[in-house]
Image (cartoon, grey):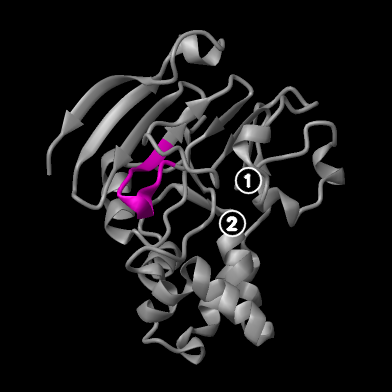
Amino acid sequence: MGKKFAIGDVHGCLDSLKRLLDVVSPEKGDKVVMLGDYVDRGPDSRGVIDYLLEWPWEADLVTLKGNHEAIMGEAGMSDDHMDYWERVGGLETLGSYGGKLENIPEEHWEFIRGCEPYYQTKKVIYVHGGVEAGKSLKKQNLEDMAWHRFHDARAHLSGKLVVCGHTIQRDGVPSDKGHTICIDTGACRGGWLTCLEARTRKFWQTNEDGEVRLGMLKTSQRKGKGKKGMVLLAEDEK
C-alpha cells in the first residue's frame, strides 16, 4: 500500500511547492492530497495551477477546493465579488495572469471547478477547512467545508483523523489536537509550506528562501499534554 501525503495551503508559492515535492519524492502507488488554496497572496498562482495540471510525478494527485478557489470562482459574478477577491489576495493572482481576468485560461477555470470538497480513506478525512463533528460526510454542507476554522474543531463522529489547512499556524509548526491536524503554516506570509504523512505524523517543510526542515509531531501534543511543538529531525539551509 502506498503512502499518503497531504500538502497545505500553497497560495502561489510555486518554488516552495516544487522544492517540497522534490524532498518528499512521492512514488508510484503513493497519493498526494492537496488541501486547497493554490491561489492568492503569493507570487505565482498561475504557475502553481500549471504545475498541478502538468503533474510530473507518478504518484496519484487529489486536489481539494479551498475557500480562495471558491472566492476566485465567484469573482466574475459582480463588482462586489471582484472587489472582495482582490482584497483577499486576488490582485496578486491577477498579476500572475497579466492583470486581466480574461487572461485566465479555460483549463484553469475547469481545474478550479473540478476540485473536490474532501477526500477520505479508511482512517483519515482530508479537507481544506474542517468538518461538522456531529454530521456524517454525506450530510455536510460541502461549501462550508472550505471555511471551518481549526480552533472550532472537534472529533468527528466517524472516529477518523481530520487533516486540514485554512487556519494559519503562525509559529510555522503544524498543530495536532489528536483528532484533527492543521498544516497551514503560512507559506505566503514568510512561513513554511508543509507536507504531512498522517499515518506517522512525520512532516516536511520548505519556504521561499529555499530552506528545508523535517519534523515529527510530538506524542505529548497529540495527547493534549505539554507545549505545542515538534521534534526536529533535520534542517538544511538553501
From the viewer's perspective, is residue 166 above or below residue 212? below
Looking at the image, residue 175 sits to the left or right of residue 139; the answer is left
Residue that appears at 62% across and 74% down: 73
Q: Which mark is residue 129?
A: 1
CB-based contact (under 8 Å), mark 2 and mark 1: yes
From the viewer's perspective, is residue 77 above or below residue 159? below
- Mark 2, secondary structure of its residue: loop
Q: Does the magenta portion include 16?
A: no
Where residue 8 appears, x then y in whole percent? 47, 45
Looking at the image, residue 123 sits to the left or right of residue 3; the answer is right
Looking at the image, residue 82 sits to the left or right of residue 232; the answer is right
Residue numbers of the magenta segment: 185-195
Q: What amino acid is labelled 1 in the image?
A: Gly
Where residue 139 appears, x then y in whole percent? 87, 44
From the viewer's perspective, is residue 165 above or below residue 213? below
Q: Compare residues 122 and 66 and report the one nearer the observer.
A: 66
Q: Which mark is residue 66?
A: 2
Residue sitting at the far left: 238
Q: Compare residues 177 and 103 and report the one nearer the observer.
A: 177
Residue that appears at 46% across and 68% down: 89
Q: Compare residues 29 and 224 and report the one nearer the observer.
A: 224
**Residue 30 visible (yes or no):** no
